[in-house]
Image (spheres, grey):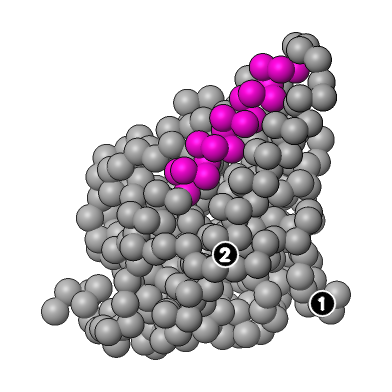
Amino acid sequence: MSAIDRIAGPWQGRGTLGGIPFACADGPTMAAGWARDLAALLGQYDREIDAIVRARVAVSATISDRRIQRMIDGIAHQRSALAQLFADAGLAPAAAPPLAPGRTSPLLAGWRQILRDWAWDDRSEEARIGADAVCDALRGAGVGELGEMVVLGAGAGRMPYELHLRFNSRLSLLLDINPIPALVGHRVIGGQTIELVEFPSTPVEPTDAATTWALRRRGPPVSGLYFAFDDARAPALPDAAFDTLLTCWYIDQVDQPFADLIAVVRRLLRPGGLWINTGPLVYRRRAVVDRLSLTELLTTVTARGFAALHVDSASRRFLCSPVAGDGRIERVHTMLWRRDATIEPSRRSLDIAHALAPTATKPLSTADGPGKAPERRAGR
């Protein structure tokens, strides 16, 4: 029996969407909710086009006319592309109330991350730099292979793809609860090209106001990499099933207490298994008491039976689009842990926490280019 058959056996009969299985038992309910969300999103696009057209009539022809037409065409293209993405996956929109004014569709969560993963490569090194940093940390810690890996909150899958490729993994299972990143990542990693549109809030040029990108895989094909729909806070996976677990830009964003998150990681990893985490500690949803600093996080993870193999911090670009005049710089922490490692965990981890955490910030890489001001607005 193959590794994926062994892990996915209990999912039989739970259905699929676009070739991606539902690991969770409530897949039909999730799909029905997505169908309603899709209808609301498509209706929102129609209303946006109508509003722009009406406003345009009242404005005399100016240099802005080109930008306005670009927006109209871009929204229409986006509407068609997303409708087709779901149609190809076998999901049709269902009747739903309109989105409230000013509200962004939940389907678009992580939109710019999708573009960062698979669209910007020809004009940005952001995705490559992040993957290189994790690979350098792994090799520096003497890690030669990842074996069978699970990814919590995988999004569109660029980081897992890079690790799977560079370390020749036997299996990588990518879990996410958001359909658009998973469907896009599944198709792009499979070799397809998808055209999607970016609507930067601060376009550099008028033509950048609606930029159509061709999302494609630039590296070689891989085997053994799979997506699945599941709630990563309580995944429907067997205990001690994986050699490696990856969380990237996840642990500070997931709506779950750290103690529960660490328990999930510990449950899924085999003894001696490796936990790779990379991302900032920029909290949005956590209670104040659970907004751990790096040193607190290191101590907390150590107390639950993990040993730190590597910790570093560096200031890096985050979602700095090539066609936008804004973006963010975040302090990204890359951490490697062993579950129940043979080395004495408490002393080593605390040494790393006290020695590295206060001083590990590196200057922004020259490859990243000049800094940009913080940007908080969600993408379309």
Q: Is residue 78 magenta?
A: yes
**Residue 356 falls in which quadrant of the image?**
bottom right
At x 33%, y 50%, the residue is: 187
Please tell me which residue lies in front, 2 or 28: 28
Furthest-left residue in this view: 1
Label 2 CA crowd tier, 10 Å (few <14, some 14–19, many 20+):
many
In the depicted structure, whether residue 342 falls above or below residue 152: below
Which residue is label 1 attached to?
A: 287
Image coords of residue 175 (percent x, y):
44, 68
Q: Is residue 135 left or right of residue 247?
A: left
At x 22%, y 55%, the residue is: 223
Which residues are the magenta region? 64-82
- The amino acid type of the residue labelled 2 equals Asp
| Magenta stretch, main secondary structure class | helix
Which residue is label 2 attached to?
A: 37
Image coords of residue 90 (percent x, y):
34, 63
